[in-house]
Amino acid sequence: MEIVLTRIDDRLVHGQITTAWTRQYHCDMIYVIDEQTAKDPLLKRILKATAPPDIKVEALTVGQAVELLNDNANKGKVMILTKGPESIVRLVENNVPINAVNVGGMQPKAGTKKISKAVSVADDDIKNFKKLASRNVKIEIKMIPTENGGDLISLI
Amino acid sequence: MIGILVVTHGSFGRELIKSTEVIIGHQENTYALGLNEGDGIDEFKEKVAEEIKKLDGGDGVLVFADLFGGSPFNVTAINISNNEKGMGFECVTGVNSPMLIDAFTMRNSLKIAELKNQCMESGKLGIKDMRSEI
């Protein structure tokens, strides 16, 4: 299993944006790593129905994802999709080989600070991004592949 | 009366309703919600759920969304579980003018499931090639 893209987008799979990324990176499947989605049958149904054409989508907890990603019997190009950096820190701490993260959108909420047009971060997010940076994970803000990316760490 | 809610990115829905009203006059029991750049999805999700409740006068609500799989559609679909046993909240995507005009003009004579099918028909039939027709 080759992780071709690790993306943070709190809207998860949404229409043409997601399709643009799967096309750019020739993904076979998307692992949506989100505890809430993994445990909610309706959210899973919506996810599967709205996935880009010809792409398999799985909704997984971090634990399930670690197992699947470390299983060498699995083949294919996978895109990892999460709502925030916390899950990615946990993946990396479990030796999942991630060396770059693309950040699409993180919506504003109570306690968040807006650092770019579509990205707002809470203190926990900042801590987690810095943890990733300390492990040499490159973090870039980019909504769609054709945009010019911006380095996230320089903004927090 | 079947309520009509249009959920889209930006102000497409609001403008679509306004444009339809230019043709068929002012419409009651209808609302548009637009998701704009930088808007939070959780807040939008709540607004959609709230409007569906508000517009439901007992005959159900027909929701139109712009893009299947887009965030406005996704947060609408989440309301399915609140309505499995409900009186008929339906959703059609790819909203366009012919679809919306039929929704407004036929909602007093059709039940919501029939109205949904009628709108899907007219939405598709409205897509024509000038050269093939004339």
Image: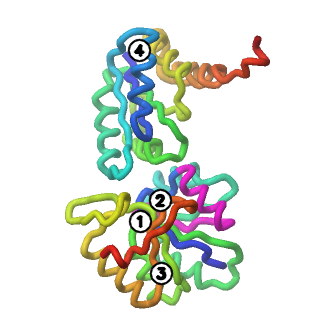
Tell me the distance, in whole angstroms, between the alpha carbons under discs 3 and 2: 20 Å
> Which residue is disc 1 drawn over?
A83
Asked if badge 4 and badge 2 are on a common chain, one would say: no
Please name the residue that numbered disc 4 is placed on. Answer: B21
Is the residue under label 2 in contact with that under label 1 (CB below 8 Å)?
yes
- Give the residue type at disc 2: Leu
Q: Residue at x 54, y 54 (%)?
A: A17
Q: Chain of mark 2?
A: A
**What number is the disc on residue A66?**
none
Find residue B114 and report its horizontal and vertical position in percent: 54, 19
x, y (%) of residue B22?
42, 12
User: Which portion, as a residue range, is magenta?
Assistant: A15-39
Asked whether A92 or B80 is in front, the reply is: A92
Q: Chain of mark 4?
A: B
Crowding at dot 3, Cα within 10 Å, few <14 / some 14-19 / many 20+, comes out as: some
Label 2 sits on a secondary structure element that is loop
Helix, strand or loop at mark 1: loop
Q: Residue furthest front?
A: A148
Q: Dividing the picture into quarters, in which one does residue A56 lie?
A: bottom right
10 Å neighbourhood of mark 2: few (<14), some, or many (≥20)?
A: many
In the picture of the structure, the residue carrying the numbered disc 3 is A138
Q: Is residue A48 above or below residue A102?
A: above
Give the residue type at disc 1. Lys
